[in-house]
Amino acid sequence: MRTARLPRSGIAGWWLAAVVLAAGCNGLTNAPAVSHDGGRETATHDGAGPVEPGHNSDGAGGNQQDGESAVAIDAQLDGRPVQVGDGAPTAVLGLDAPVPVDLDAAGGLGGAGGTGGLGGGAGEAGDASLASPDTNFPADDGNANQPDLLFVVDLAPVDSPTDVLADRPGEGPVPDGSLLGVDVGTPDSRPPDGTIVLFTVNAGPDQTICDGWPATLAAQTQGGTRPYAYVWSASPTCSGCINNATAAQTDVVPTATTAFSVTAHDSLNAVATDSVTVTVVDAVADAGPEVSVDPGVPVRIGTPARAGYTYAWTCDRAACALSGPTTAQPTVSPRLSTMYTVTVTSPEGCIGSDSTTVWVNLPVSTTPRDGEPAYPNAASLFVQFGAGVLASSISTDTVLLRESASGTPVGITNTYNSTLHLLTIKPTGYNPAVAQYTLTLVGGVAGLLSDDPLRPQRLPDDVTVAYTLASAPDFTAPTIISRSPAPFATGVGTNTRVAATFSERLDPTTVTAGNFALSNGPTTSLAGTLSYDANTATVIFVPAAPLSAGTTYTVRASGIKDLSGNTMFATTWTFTTGGAADTIPPAVTAVAPASGATRVSATTVVAVTFSESVDPTTLAAGIQVAAGAAQVAGSVTCDAANRLATFTPSAALASQTLYTITVAGVKDLAGNTMTAAFTSTFTTARVLFADSFESGVANWTLTSPWGLTTTSYTSPTHSLTDSPAGNYAPNLIGLSATSIAINVTNVASVSLSYWLSGQTQPQPGGDALYVDYTINGGATWPTLANYSGTLGWAQHIQTIPPGPGTFPPGTTSLQIRFRLTSNGNQQFDGVYLDDVTVQAN
């Protein structure tokens, strides 16, 4: 015989049990007739059913065949639908009495003595295998309307219509409707009879979504008593990410990986919870930061690739200038400011995008140059832009002229030539007592902008040009020092350009088609484009069409003026073309420092010689010096007569460092581009001391008022000066700047380099700057050099000790001193020092 003890339940403090009837049981209407006790509440009645052979009375129900039983109960009962086993509502029988109960094989309810009117014979309860009474059952609470025990009975394991077990007449009253509404159930897809289905909720499987995409969550509930109620929550909390927090099914849109929990309640206030994790995958699209570059200079954008991700780049220009549109970090070389957008697809199919802008600098060259030592005081200032400028961006807020020392504004008038992209600045009132001035061109989004309607080019930073007016007028006319093609040249390519380099810089407004022309007859000028490169003082004419083969052409130059207004003498020369175009590109024939050179001065310049005359406008981007991936800032000049380009670093190079010279993209005057890049390396010497004055004056002992200034410098943005506030004082003797002790142990001699500019009363009898040194702790201070008068920014180099000598044995320390002296006659602005370097020879 099977027995089962009623388990305890957590639903509203009630006790639940499943009374299992064996498979094969018919519906209640097909069960054999049994006897009833009529509700008698004495222990002498055993309920219904014959006594099984060999046993005592078994209480209510039981006959010999499993599953064929009926229930006769005269206690107060309640019928409640619940889900048990097959999922269909069954009967809940409520007993208002604490009775230990067992089950027999026939499914009958046995008792232990007929307590509470359940019947049962005295002595044994149920069949032979009875369990001992459970003394932990709750006591009767005395409330007939509140069952103390619940019996959940599956009344039919097969399909059958609903049956009603009505009250039977007996000795005592039985409440009507004790077992009303019993669904005898369906067998389809149900677990075996007797399986207890607890109240649970399932939030569903974990999910992975793309950032910004929704996920659908659906709670599935089993057991309990309908209707159900739901509440969704999120951890971490995400405001507004749950579409309907009280629905069984809802959409969620988390922005980060989130655990969503659902809490379900049934109608009897049972509670069940479950959670699901929604993992958010980000496509991690990052186009990188915005950058500024010169036109055509390559720069890498984007961020390193991630495994399994794919990349697709686009831009907002007709030509993107991309090295690889499907790589994570392409190289771009735009000539106009361009926005680049990358679309990234993750291995999960998530898509993200990001954009960055490569701002192309507005090319600009100025006349005078920064640090110009003797600019004609009657000359205008000129700014040559590399692109058309938005006229409305030229104003007194973006173009400023001031006295360098005091900052006092100087009146100017601006004239812009949109055809030449040339700004002419005419000072209207120099101060006769002031020689040094600073021109400022304002950069950034509020500064000077190109006229590109899509995305203007701009100056990345303010451009400042400090210059000193010449003390004497210039009456020397400019002359041509280099011509290409050379006079009387033959076999010249039909695609040649004509270039003339002058002895000094020109007034660019005088470089016109009427003053410089190419003709194939006495007076007929050819159509073409005329340009002027202020950095090299070179005029270039590019014919609009190829020249005729075997033809003599004449170049005429006249009326061109220098900055002081002196006009050149008119000149002509001729050349004869050959039968074909020039297709031979230029090549590098020599470089200095030589490739592989070691112990090269940290203040060296790089000189590159070409096989033919080159287009000077291609040199700035064409010659690069770098230490590893770090580019060296500097400027390029061109000596057209000697086919020589010179790169001058903006500051001293690093100590004992390998540098690489790269020459690429340079064109000749026929437009042919170098076919292969030229590279060369050199290693610098040991630098013992270097100061650009960008980090203060800790390396110096200063006699007041020596100090830092931003008025004038060679490497931005500071220099050292004797009188930051204005002119120096009269009758100076010991006004000095002395360096810290420099270790020269085991060094035979050193090279001292410094940049110097300024103005003092000229010698003889005037004021002067002296450069001294000591190797004995200041016991003696030999003088290396002295300077006076008007001094433009220039680099000066001396060897210590002077001449071919070496330091005395045992020398370990060296100090440098810059000393200004003055008399009582005239006082001037004084001197400026920058980029002081000491290196071992």
Image (tube, rainbow, N blue to C red):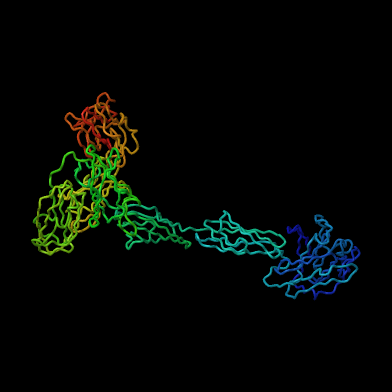
| Quarter assignment of residue 317 | bottom left
Q: Along the horizontal axis of the image, is 222 left or right of 544?
A: right
Judge left or right: residue 429 versus residue 102: left
The residue closer to the viewer here, 572 or 151, is 572
Quarter of the view holding residue 721: top left
Decide: is 210 above or below 704. Answer: below
Number of marks in the image?
0
Q: Is residue 344 left or right of residue 388?
A: right
Q: Is residue 571 above or below residue 699?
A: below
Which quarter of the rendered picture does the N terminus lie within? bottom right
Q: Is residue 697 left or right of residue 748?
A: right
From this viewpoint, is residue 736 visible?
Answer: yes
Residue 698 % position (x, y): 34, 33
Viewer-proximal residue, 111 or 545?
Answer: 545
Residue 817 versus residue 629: which sits nearer the camera? 817
Residue 219: x %, y % from top left: 62, 63
User: What is the quadrant of residue 766 in the picture?
Assistant: top left
Q: Which residue is rendered at x = 28% and y = 36% of the image?
A: 836
For the C terminus, the quadrant is top left
- How far across and down, in percent of the image, does residue 72 sit? 84, 68
Is 170 drawn above or below residue 148 in the view shown? below
Q: Residue furthest top?
A: 779
| Rendering coords of residue 751 (x, y %) | 24, 35
